[in-house]
Structures are given as C-alpha cells and as structure tokens.
Amino acid sequence: MTEPIRVLIADDQTLFRDSLRLLFTMTPGFAVVGEAATGRDAVRLARAERPDVALLDVRMPDLDGIEAAELICAEVTDTRVLMLTTFDLDEYVYRALRAGASGFLLKDAGAPDLIAAVRLVASGEALLAPSVTQRLIDAFTGQPRPAQAFHKDLTGITDREREVLELIGRGLSNTEIARHLTLGLATVKTHVGRLLAKLSARDRAQLVVVAYETGLVVTERS
C-alpha cells in the first residue's frame, strides 16, 4: 500500500485552514500531520513532523511565509514547500523561489487544482506555470541584481545544458524543450537531472532562479 502524502498546513485564517484540513482528510492518499497559524509554528512543526509538503500562506504573523519557507527548506531538506497567497504579486513569486519553495499557488485555485499541485510538488516536481515564470522574469529585470547571486556562474555546464537551462528559465516544459531543440524527451530529462546535480538545485523552480541570476535569461526592460 502506498504511503499517504503527509501535509502540513500553515495559515493564520482559521476558516481557510479548516477547509484545507477537511479537503486533505477527505481525499484518499493524504494525511494532515500538523496545522499552524504562524510562520514560527510552521517551522517548529516541520522540524518535528517532517511532512512531505508544507502549505504556507505568504502573509502570517510572527514570521511570514517566505521566511518560514527559507528556514524549512534549509533545515528540513526532505520537505517540499508550496506557497499559498491571495496576492498575485511578483515580489512574492521571486522571494518564494529564492527561499527554496517548489511552487506558488493562489488561494482561489479550485480543490482539484490544489490536490494536483500538492501531488506534483510531493513527487519532486516544481509547480511553475509559464505565466508565473514570465511574471518572475519581468520582476527580476525590474530590480537590482542581488549582491550575492544564487549561483555566481555556470562553470561546468555544457553548451547543450546551457540551452536547456535557458529554456527552463523561459518557462518551457520538458516536452516543449524537446521539440524546440529536436531532442528526445528522455534526453531532455537527462539534461535537467544533470543541471539539478551540477547546480545543487532542489528542483526546477530553483533552476529558473539560476537562469535569471546568472544573466542567462535576459528580457528587454520597458
């Protein structure tokens, strides 16, 4: 029997938190292992329970969701973080991904989308739609380059891997990359795996951040 996906829910709104608990309790294949109303409690519970996925609201008292995500990703490395927010703002997308989050989802998403998102993130994938990627590119090009980039350079990356990384940064899926570069899907997956290993990235979302911070993805400023 397959083990259920263990979920931690962190949100300061009791009604929304209760709704999520009911959703995951009633859905086969999931188990809620903790609930938190503050970012600090979310970190404490993540350390204690080591959930597969932590659902974190961006705006919480005591410690915001981005700061909580950063601590969880650094200290509980087998836990994936999915950010939930009412606010579709570029700064949150960028900060969440830099903190190590594997996905970003608006609270008005339907229950099937939320369930699918948690399953996707739990499997080790990143929930990063092209529309979110484009907003991230726009936000990144509109602000100063961080003093210390996530990765300073792309030393050790082959030319083909560099091409794949650029396309990941532009929001293309593996299938789209395969079509664009006239490669087999298995070959693209191999390149992505090597990029993750060489760049010490948790998942595809962090590869996107690498592509921006190294200047591999460049867009025109308006």
Image (cartoon, grey):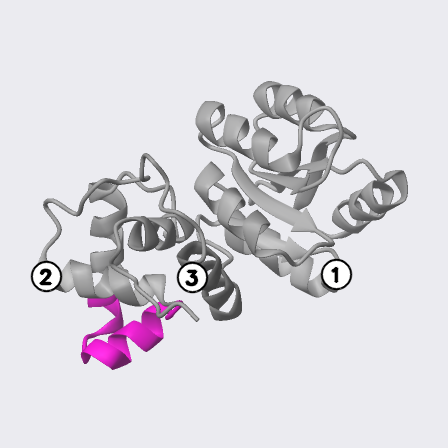
Q: Is residue 188 above or below residue 12?
A: below
> What amino acid type is highlighted by mark number 3?
Ile
Circle 1 sits in a helix, a strand or a loop, which is it? helix
Q: Is residue 70 above or below residue 115?
A: above
Which residue reaches farthest right? 15
How far separated are the C-alphas under marks 1 and 2?
41 Å
| Mark toward the viewer: 3 or 1 | 3
Q: What's drawn in magenta, residue-wise?
A: 171-188
| Label 2 crowd (10 A; few <14 / some 14-19 / many >=20) | few
Of 25 and 182, the residue lying toward us: 182
Marks 3/2 in contact by CB < 8 Å: the verdict is no
Q: Residue at x 79, y 30 (%)?
A: 37
Residue 177: within the magenta?
yes
Q: Which residue is mark 2?
A: 159
Marks 1/2 in contact by CB < 8 Å: the verdict is no
Q: Residue at x 34, y 61 (%)?
A: 169
Q: Which residue is mark 1?
A: 111
Q: Quadrant of residue 63?
A: top right
Q: Is residue 2 toward the left or the right of residue 189 in the image?
A: right
* Mark 3 or 1, nearer chain start: 1
Q: Is residue 104 toward the left or the right of residue 182 in the image?
A: right
